[in-house]
Image: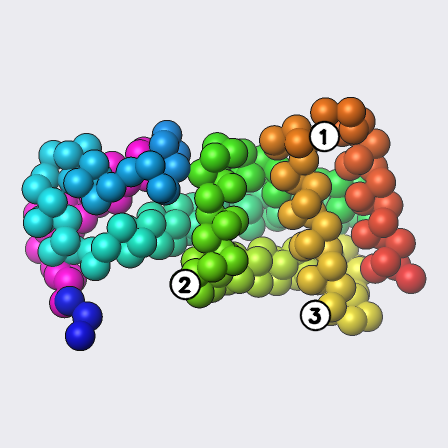
Amino acid sequence: MDKEVRKPQQKRSIEKKKRILDAANTLLLKNGYYDITTADIAKAAGLSTGTVYAYFKDKKDILLSSLYESSKSFREQTLNELDKISQNDNPVNTIKNVLQIFIKFHTSYPKKYHDELMSLSYIDEDVRGFFENIKNTMMDAVVKHLKKCGINLKHEKEQSFLIYSLIENIEDELVFDIYPDLNKNILIDECARVIVNMIMD
């Protein structure tokens, strides 16, 4: 039977839970997921380990809560940035601008933490579900913006999947410089060209 966790109602309880999440987020960004413990999070929050377990089932529960909290801001900022893109721009520049938005927010995770999250997404259903939700939300926003620009995808579901997959791989390279010999400007141009050729066909 799963342990019951407290759902904070009072201001003091809400603040305690926020302290735990703030401390967890700081440690996750600094050390990654595997190199911290619930006790580390409790210490950083200035609370007992027992208090942390009153609000969260385990370390993974803290991770997911931290990810969901940070994703709210990420989603809002991304939507705001998409709204700033001119609807009258040419398709290549539109895609390049979309790519730059994704790159900008991709830098919020240090490489070690990013790699751990990606590995977790392959082995943990809940983490995978989180990233699936992010992908669907972001691509819905991109497709909506493309439609405003007069670009309608012939096979929306499949083309959205391909666009996201390509952007996801490109942003990893541009943020983490995995292959230093690649010319980043050419990479962006070619990525935009491939996507535009697909969606304008």
Q: CA distance from mark 2 to mark 1?
A: 31 Å
Sort mark 1 into few (<14), some (14-19) or many (20+) by Cα contacts within 10 Å.
few
Q: Is residue 126 above or below residue 185?
A: below
For badge 1, the amino acid type reads Tyr
Q: Horizontal and vertical percent for residue 20?
A: 20, 43
Sort mark 3 into few (<14), some (14-19) or many (20+) by Cα contacts within 10 Å.
few
Is residue 198 shown left or right of residue 112? right
Q: Horizontal and vertical percent for residue 30?
A: 37, 30
What residue sits 61% from the left and 43% below the top?
102
Q: Which residue is mark 2?
A: 126
Is residue 48 shown left or right of residue 57? left
* Residues tagged 1 and 3 counted as in contact (Cβ below 8 A): no
> Is residue 89 visible to us here?
no
Q: CA distance from mark 1 to mark 3?
A: 30 Å
What residue sits 47% from the left and 35% below the top?
112
| Lower sequence index among marks 1 and 3 | 3
Q: CA distance from mark 2 to mark 3?
A: 23 Å
Q: Which residue is mark 1?
A: 179
Is residue 15 shown left or right of residue 85? left
Give me the disc on residue 157: 3
Is residue 138 shown left or right of residue 42? right
Mark 2 falls on what kind of element? helix
Q: Nearer the viewer, mark 1 or mark 3?
A: 1
Q: Is residue 177 above or below residue 116?
A: above
Q: Horizontal and vertical percent for residue 141?
A: 61, 58
| Lower sequence index among marks 2 and 1 | 2
Q: Main secondary structure of the magenta part?
A: helix
Q: In this picture, which residue range is highlighted in magenta?
A: 4-27
For badge 2, the amino acid type reads Asp
